[in-house]
Amino acid sequence: MTKLPDAVFLDRDGTIMEDAHYIKSPDQVRLIPGAAAAVKRINDAKVPAILITNQSGLARGIFKLEDHEGVRCDFES
């Protein structure tokens, strides 16, 4: 039997969501086909699926933390 990993780290943009450079609105969120089902399989296997994201638009002032939080909350719902 194959041992399952202790956790799976997934990059948000381009892996779970379509990469739409500097996403600052929930309206821009588009899941990649099959991504939700893949995360469900990970969850069903009792393996933590950890979503990571590097949002350089925050540091560059292209969007505000409130914008990012709005996208995150919508994405998690």
Image (cartoon, rainbow, N blue to C red):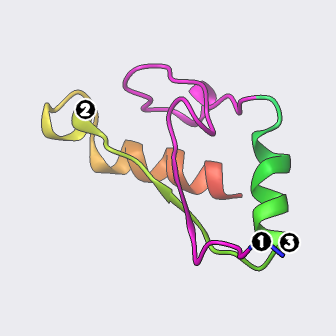
**Rendering coords of residue 43 (x, y %):** 77, 70
Q: Amino acid at mark 3?
A: Asp
**Rendering coords of residue 28 (x, y %):** 58, 25
Left or right placement of residue 42 versus residue 72 in this view: right
- Is 40 in front, or is 67? 40
Q: Amino acid at mark 1?
A: Thr
Q: Quadrant of the N terminus?
A: bottom right
- Is 13 in front, or is 4? 4
- Any magenta on residue 5? yes
Element at label 3: helix
Residue furthest toward the top? Answer: 20
- Is 32 in front, or is 28? 32
Instruction: Give the spatial CA distance, label 1 vs label 3.
Output: 16 Å
Q: Amino acid at mark 2?
A: Gly
**Rendering coords of residue 27 (x, y %):** 62, 28
Which badge, 3 or 2, comes first in the chain's sequence?
3
Q: State the residue position of label 3.
A: 44
Residue furthest toward the front? Answer: 1
Name the residue located 40 percent from the left edge and 46 percent from the top edge.
Answer: 68
Left or right placement of residue 35 versus residue 19 in this view: right
Which badge, 2 or 1, comes first in the chain's sequence?
1
Magenta stretch, residue numbers: 3-32
- Any magenta on residue 18? yes
Of tags 3 and 2, the one toward the viewer is 3
Label 3: few (<14), some (14–19) or many (≥20) C-alpha neighbours in 10 Å: few
Q: Main secondary structure of the magenta part?
A: loop
Element at label 2: helix
Q: State the residue position of label 2.
A: 57
The quarter of the picture where residue 15 lies is top right
Name the residue located 77 percent from the left edge and 71 percent from the top edge.
Answer: 2
Question: How many marks are shown on the rendered structure?
Answer: 3
Q: State the residue position of label 1.
A: 2
